[in-house]
Amino acid sequence: MVRSVTYASFSDEKALLHAAKELRGQGISLIDAFTPFPVHGLDEVLGETRSRLPIVCFVAASIGCLVSMWFQIWTSAQDWPINVGGKPFASIPAFIPVTFEVTVLLGGLVSVAAFFFRSRLYPGKTAATPNRNVTSDGFWIAVEHQAAKVDAADLSCILQELGASHIQHEEQEV
Amino acid sequence: MSHTPISSTRKPLVIGDKSYGDVTQDVLRPIEARPTKGWFVCLMVAATCLVFGAATVWYQIATGIGTWGLNKTVGWAWDITNFVFWVGIGHAGTLISAILLLFRQKWRTSINRAAEAMTIFAVICAAIFPVIHMGRPWLAFWVFPYPNTRGPLWVNFRSPLLWDVFAISTYFTISLVFWFIGLIPDLATMRDHSSSAFKRKLCGVFSLGWNGSARTWARYETLCLILAGLATPLVVSVHSIVSMDFATAVIPGWHATLFPPYFVAGAVFSGFAMVLTLMILTRKVMKLDSYITDGHLQMMCKVLQLTGLMVALAYSTEFFMAWYSGNAYERFVFINRATGPFAWAFWTMVTCNVVLPQLLWIKRLRLNVLFLLGMSIVVNIGMWFERFVIITTSIHRDYLPSSWADYAPTWVEKATFLGTFGLFFTCFLLFLRFLPMIAISEVKGVLHYGKAHGKEVTHG
């Protein structure tokens, strides 16, 4: 399926946010926006729900916590108990530091992996940007005019009224 | 980074009327331009130290660590001093990127990238010493619990030395990952703005196809908060665990419950001193004064002064507790520390860490960049001596006078320490040359901070 996408650039984050809100007010939803730094409020306009990464992190960290504590008890008290200075084989308080470190390590690494997976970021991926100034000073939005139920010319007019400095159309394979 | 950073009552974080494009240009310019002569000279000096240090490491491993000045009484000295010194320096980076992110300290954005790089290089330098001290570094992997043919014989999870292995390797991994995550948007900027095709290709691979999508940015910020939340207790845990290497031993002068907070304060103190040294030098050389402003230096001064006072409080508490404990051995160690054969080291420490930093109360001196540079180096020297004093004075004269001994480092120990400075500065100079030393995307987010026209942005 081919979809035709209209990209429009704005002078700064204020103009971009204003335009995005106006478009949504007119019932035209955005596919995405592209900015050189995070613009707050844009995620709400895009209808982005709260990220579930904290849940992923919590689950991974809990697994790290339980597994490392179990592993220390198993090696020290079960598999090969060694008397070290008369301390109990399952010296739980002494196992806390390693448990904490493994909790943090697993929570952190799994969160990062989940972020890459969810955002589809991987080495060698070709960046799909409307313009290479997106990573410097370009503020772009992407609108699909078929889904917006307006024709391309009308959409361009609306975008120009909202202050878009550049408008470009692109046919994309989906 | 996480909120529209607006304040009309505060001073701007970036000086001058910069546009977003200017920020990109300013930070990428030193990477795009040909390296200067000064950079080459610095790299040559650093690399020479590194090669000399590496040759010394080869020599001491081939010969054995009998080449060190250690003896039966003084079993830890320069090696562990250097280890703690470098780990301590490695604390500023993640403190700046994690704790200051949670406290929403916007001024961190100009210095966090370089400080995190410093952290990573410092931890690498630190890890070298215990690995050599093992005597058989090719068996270093024995410190990890893996199924082995020796039983399997597991590691001793009750030992603080093992906790150290986990703490430092976790700290290194998380710091490295945090640093890389922060770099991704800037690598994408390099990919889109570099003049060399090879650089565009290379940055393209490492920027993972980053396209500045608002949906990705939203998740990215959540991820940064998660990592900051995880790294914050991690920063505190690492030096606490390092301090337990000492505190869990029954050596007078080491056996103190004060050690974990004392060491963490000391680590932040030394780390910020090193950040201050590096930032004052690099902002001058790379002409980034509008980004790393005098305001940034003042903020770092405040952290330095606070942690310096905490360290001073810890020194006095140690002496008070030695007297108050009524323990003859404990009392002797502290009297010996201040008046014995290593008194010169103790008084150097007190001068550098307690007496001289009080000059920072004087505003005129605090605003003098050359004075700050000198002070940051003084603190670094003082913090090295702190670790030397704690380690050596506590063990060279303990319970049994017949086993008292003296200690002096050999050239091998000195050369190894010099070598780690070579490694640190070689890595740091290469970092300055090949990666953006200021977090471009984060600075753009605080560009209008404290500037009048920024007020209008708040309605977002």
Image (cartoon, coloured by chain):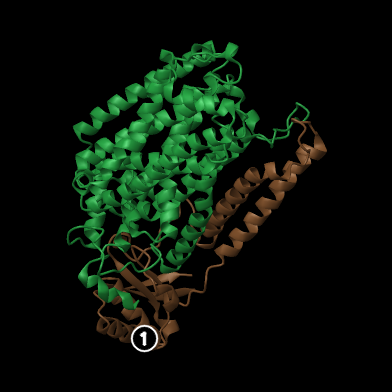
Left/right of residue B437 with respect to residue B328 in the rendered view: left
Identify which residue, B237 or B226, lies in the foreground: B237
Indicate the secondary structure of the residue bearing disc 1. Answer: loop
Question: Residue visible at 64% across and 59% down?
Answer: A59
- Which color has been applied to chain A in this rendered view? brown
Quarter assignment of residue B120: top left
User: Is the residue B238 above or below the residue B210 in the image?
Assistant: above
For image coordinates 24% across by 61% down, the residue present is B12
Pinpoint residue B280: horizontal percent, then vertical percent.
25, 42
Which of B248/B440 is in front? Answer: B248
Judge the density around disc 1: few (<14), some (14-19), many (≥20) Cα neighbours within 10 Å. Answer: few
- Which residue matches tag 1? A151
Q: Give the residue at x 49% y 53%.
A: A122
B42 in relation to A24, above or below: above
Residue A151 lies, in percent from the top left, at 36, 86
| Residue B131 x %, y % | 54, 26
Q: In this view, does B159 lie to the left or right of B242?
A: right
Chain in green (letter): B
In this rendering, position of residue B56 left or right of residue B17? right
The x, y position of residue A53, in whole percent, is 55, 63
Quadrant of the frame with the N terminus of chain B: bottom left
Q: In this view, does B367 lie above or below A30?
A: above
Q: Is residue B285 left or right of residue B115?
A: left
